[in-house]
Image (cartoon, grey):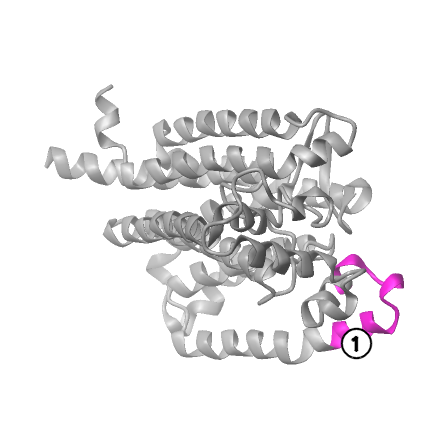
Amino acid sequence: MRKLKYLDYWLLVPYLILSVFGIVMVYSASADIGSQNGGSPGSYLIKQTIFVVMGLVILGFMVAVNIEKLRNRNLLRLAGYLAYAALGFLLVIGQTVNGAAGWIHLGPVNLQPAEFIKFYVIIWLANAIAERQDDLQAYTWWSTMRQPLLVCLLIIGLIFVQPDLGGAAINGAIMFVLFLSSGFSSRLAKWLFSGVIIGGFGVVIPLLAWIAGLSVGQHSYQLQRIVAFLNPFKHAQGVGQQLVNSYYAISNGGVFGVGWGNSIQKTGYLPEPNTDFIMAILTEELGLITALGVIALLFLIILRTVLVGVRTNSTYQALVCYGAATYLAVQTAFNLGGVLGFLPITGVTFPFISYGGSSTWTLALVMGVVMNISARQKRYRMTH
C-alpha cells in the first residue's frame, strides 16, 4: 500500500477512464458485427474486457519492476532476436488482414508484432543512445550512432514490406524523435523532416495514386487506400467507402450525438467500426463534445509523459518518455487523420478506444514504464 502514494494519478486516472470507455465503445461498435458473423453481440466486449484486464496486470508489473533491468543487454538482445524472427515469420506465413500480412494467429487471439516492436524500439534505442551520450557530438553523430541507425532502418524495412505503412511510419517517427534528442543537428533534422513531408505528399502519394488509379481492382489494398484518400466520393461504392461513411457518421452525430448504441453506420455501412473507425462511431453516437473529451484525456497523458521526461536527470528515462509521447501522439494523429480524411487510411488503431489485444498490451507496457519513471521521481522528491 505504501507504494500507491508514489503513483502518478495524472497518468493512471486518464488511462483507466479511457480503457473502460474503450470497452463500452467496442461493445457498441461491434455488437452488429458479432451477430452478422454468427456469434454473440457481446463477443468483442468479452475479448476487449479480457485484453484490458490483462493490460492492467502488465501495467502493474511494469510499474513495480526495477527499470534498470530493462537496460540489460542480454534481455534487449533476446528481445531484438524475437522481433526480427517475428517480422521474418510474417513475411513467410503471416495471416493477411486488410491487405497486410502483419498478424500471427494464436487460437482466439491475433497478435500484431509491429505493435510490440514500438515498445521494443523505445526501450532499446533509448538505451543505445544513453550508452553513447558521452561520445555524442554533432560532428561525431554518424560514427557514433551508425549501428543503431542501420538497425532501425532494418526494422522499418521489415514492417514496411508486410506492407504495414502505418506501423512503419509510427516506428519511424519514434526513431526520428529519439535520434533528434541524441544531439543530431536540428538544422539538418528540419531539412530531412521537410523533405519527407514534401516528398510524401508531393511525389510519392500522387505517384502511387496514379499507379493504383490505372486499375484499382488489380493493385494492392494499400494503394487503394491512397486512391480513397485523394478522391473518396469518386470511389464511394468501392475503395472510398470507408472514408465516405466515416464522413456520414461524423456529420450525423453533430455536437451531441444520436445516443449510445444508435449508430447507423456501424450496421454494415462502415467497415472496421470497432477498430480503425471507432472514433467515427463514437462521434456519431456521443457527439463532437465527447470525442473532444477523449482527445483531451489523451493529450493530458501525452503532455504529462513529456513533463516526466523533462523532469528526470537520466538521459535514458527522458528518452523513454519522449519515445512514449511520440508513439501516443503520432498514432492518435494517424488514426484521426484517416477518419477525417486528412491522411491516407493507415490501419492504425486509436489508443485505448479501439478493439485489439496487441495495441492494448503495448499501451500497457509503455504506460507502465512511464509511470515507473514518474514514481521514481516522486519517491526521490519525498525522501530527499
Q: Which residue is mark 1?
A: 210
Q: Nearer the viewer, residue 136 or 160?
A: 160
**Left or right side of 24 for 68:** left
In which quadrant of the rendered image does the C terminus lie? top left
In the rendered view of the protein, which quadrant contains the N terminus?
top left
Q: What residue sits 54% from the left and 53% below the top?
A: 253
Q: Position of residue 8 (x, y in %)?
A: 27, 37
* Residue 382 x, y percent position in the rendering: 13, 35
Q: Is residue 213 magenta?
A: yes
Residue drawn 71% across the image and 36% down it: 33
Q: Residues within 10 Å of mark 1 (few under 14, many from 20)?
A: some
**Vertically, is 247 above or below 54?**
below
Would residue 125 be visible to someone looking at this image?
no
| Pick the front one: 268 or 239 | 268
**In this rendering, is residue 360 above or below 273?**
above
Q: Quadrant of residue 221?
A: bottom right
In depth, the one of 214 and 71 nearer the eye is 214
44 up-or-down from 373: above or below:
above
Q: Is residue 269 magenta?
A: no
What residue is rendered at 31% in x and 49% in y? Answer: 304
Q: Amino acid at mark 1?
A: Trp
Span colored in magenta:
207-223
Of residues 340 and 82, the one nearer the viewer is: 340
Q: Secondary structure at mark 1?
A: helix
